[in-house]
Image (cartoon, rainbow, N blue to C red):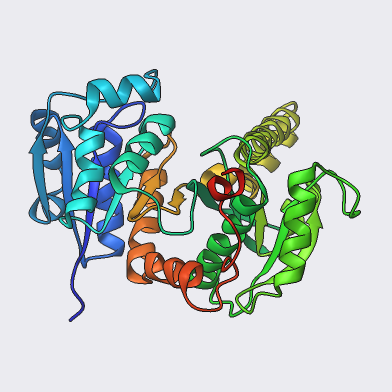
Amino acid sequence: MAKKVRIALDAMGGDVGPSVVVPGAAISLSRHPDSEFLLFGDSAAIAAQLAAYPALKAASHVIHTDVAVSMKDKPSQALRRGRKNSSMWLTIDAVRKGDADVAVSAGNTGALMAMSRFNLRTLPGVDRPAIAAVWPTARGDSVVLDLGATIGGDAHHLMALAVMGSAMARVLFDIERPTVGLLNIGVEEVKGGEEIREAAELLRAMKAPQFDFIGFVEGNGIGRGDADVIVTEGFCGNIALKAAEGTARQMSDFLRAALTKTWRAKLGYLLARDAFKALRDKLDPGKSNGGVFLGLNGVVVKSHGGTDAEGFAYAVDVGYEMVRYDLLTKINQMLNRDGSPLAGVPTAQEAVS
């Protein structure tokens, strides 16, 4: 029998804390009975929720803390106030200590990234971590990164993103050689900033056996599924994500308004309500909840702060899969083994020293 996957949860993270985290964990446990949980936060609040889920209670251990990182805290404030005693820090620290295999939080993204990087450090060959998520497309799913971990990035950073994203795609999609594209304002080689054009030249030259670099991909190519992995720096990636989420909600609102104007339209909407919901969920990348912090010496998953229990369960599922498929080892091997695509490429720090 395979050993259990140990999942550490920041029970106080997100907009409402335990009232979403605990039911979400219960849903995930029903799908993955070989999970066990460490829940960090207000023990009284957690216990009140656990009472309704006896199976989860039996598979969980609660660690009390009075400190919770606010969604409004700046990363520096969170590190000063919440370091070593907040539910978020202790959740990440459980991974560092080996008490958990993965940490999941719906808390403040900046604080979670700062604490994760400070506590776990980055893998050899990685300057800065990235947030990667599964993005629904017309032909299936793609991995898109970086969705907002860091702003900007040189050619080396973009190359590291390509390597890590392709490893994630190989694990999740069971593709031996995923296609990788760089997000750009056009597909022509002369388009885009110096960093992205330099990254494209280097990716073409390396001819990596782990993935197939196909060149530039425009914004509308994300939804079409032009590549299995779409690489961009965090500023553009976060804008693309928020724009897609907003468009999905807008389309849903437009459809609802159009289908509730007359009694015939209302009848048609009622008959097709499930189909419209499925369409909305398919269009919205936010429904594929759970961004993985790639490049860290440990597995951390970020959930949307305003998600519901089902959405949080999806984030926990993502963490479970990353552990079961040993993503961390695969990324480390791709980054640092002999013949690695990044072998011989100077890091950003080395390049300026």
Q: Residue furthest front?
A: 353
In percent of width and height, residue 118 lies at 32, 39
Q: Is residue 347 left or right of residue 221?
A: left
In percent of width and height, residue 121 lies at 34, 48
**Residue 247 vs residue 338, the one in the foreground:** 338
Q: Is residue 112 left or right of residue 154?
A: left
Q: Is residue 27 left or right of residue 62?
A: right
Q: Residue at x 43, y 33 (%)?
A: 109
Figure quadrant of the C terminus: top right
Q: Is residue 347 left or right of residue 222?
A: left
Work out whether 311 lies above or below 109: below
Q: Residue at x 64, y 41 (%)?
A: 237
Quadrant of the rendered image containing residue 82: top left
Q: Is residue 45 visible?
A: yes
Q: Residue at x 46, y 66 (%)?
A: 331
Quadrant of the rendered image containing residue 46: top left
**Residue 49 vs residue 235, the one in the foreground:** 235
Quadrant of the rendered image containing residue 200: bottom right
In percent of width and height, residue 322 lies at 38, 63
Count the marks. 0
Work out whether 167 lies above or below 301: below
Q: Is residue 226 visible?
A: no
Figure quadrant of the N terminus: bottom left
In percent of width and height, residue 231 lies at 66, 53
